[in-house]
Every structure is written in structure tokens, then in C-alpha cells.
Image: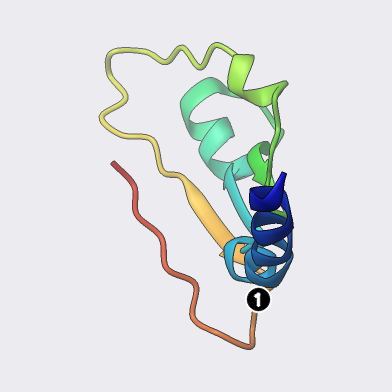
Amino acid sequence: MKWTFIIIPQLSFFSHLVHSMINLFITKAEMDRTLGLDVQLNYIENGTINLYSVKFPYRINASIAYVQFSWNTKVLDRPVNFLFN
């Protein structure tokens, strides 16, 4: 019970640090190039994972050498660090 009183204030204090408001997506132009579709595929919208799009099977021809993902953020008051593995 006493840990709850310690953890909850810490979570509320640090929550602004971990919420980056990023967007990760495949642009309409890239979707058209790879699949022939005129849509943008959003994987993360305003920091929230789009659960529908992560289930979408992204099957491309063997002749496609790469897929370009794009990202942006609405955070302007501090640097946004990211890492893709």
C-alpha cells in the first residue's frame, strides 16, 4: 500500500517526458509505389499505436528493394529521441 503512494506521484510527474506524440506511417506515395494503393498507412498516431494497421499484412513483390517509413512529431519544445531496432 505504501508503494502506491510513492509510485503514483512519480508516474504523474514523469508522464510528460515519455509521451512523445510521434507519428509513424507509410506515405501515400510509398503505398502507391509498393502496393498500388492510394492510402497512407499509419502505425502510430499521436503517440498511440494503431492496432488495426499493425494487423495489416504488408505483402510486396520481391522486386521491391526497400520500404520507406516516415515519422513526425508535434513536440516542438524539446528534442525527441528515437531508436529503431
Q: Residue at x 59, y 44 (%)?
A: 25
- The amino acid type found where label 1 is placed reads Val
The residue at the far bottom in this view is 77
Task: Identify the residue position indicated by label 1 in the image.
Answer: 75
| Residue 46 falls left or right of residue 71 | right
The residue at the far front in this view is 2
Q: Nearer the viewer, residue 60 or 76?
A: 76
Q: Nearer the viewer, residue 61 or 47?
A: 47
- Of helix, strand and loop, which one carries label 1? loop
Residue 76 in the image: x percent, y percent? Answer: 64, 84
Which quarter of the picture shows residue 27?
A: top right
Q: Is residue 24 above or below residue 62?
A: below
Q: Residue at x 42, y 68 (%)?
A: 81
Which quarter of the picture shows residue 44?
A: top right
| Residue 27 falls left or right of residue 70 | right
Colouring of the image: rainbow
Instruction: Count numbered badges in the picture.
Output: 1
Image quarter where the N terminus lies is top right
How many C-alpha atoms fall within 10 Å of the one at disc 1: few (<14), some, or many (≥20)?
A: few
Which quarter of the picture shows residue 22?
A: bottom right
Q: Residue at x 70, y 32 (%)?
A: 50
Residue 85 in the image: x percent, y percent? Answer: 28, 41
Q: Nearer the viewer, residue 62 or 5?
A: 5
Q: Is residue 14 above or below residue 42?
A: below
| Residue 59 falls left or right of residue 3 | left
Residue 51 in the image: x percent, y percent? Answer: 70, 24
Q: Residue at x 53, y 21 (%)?
A: 35
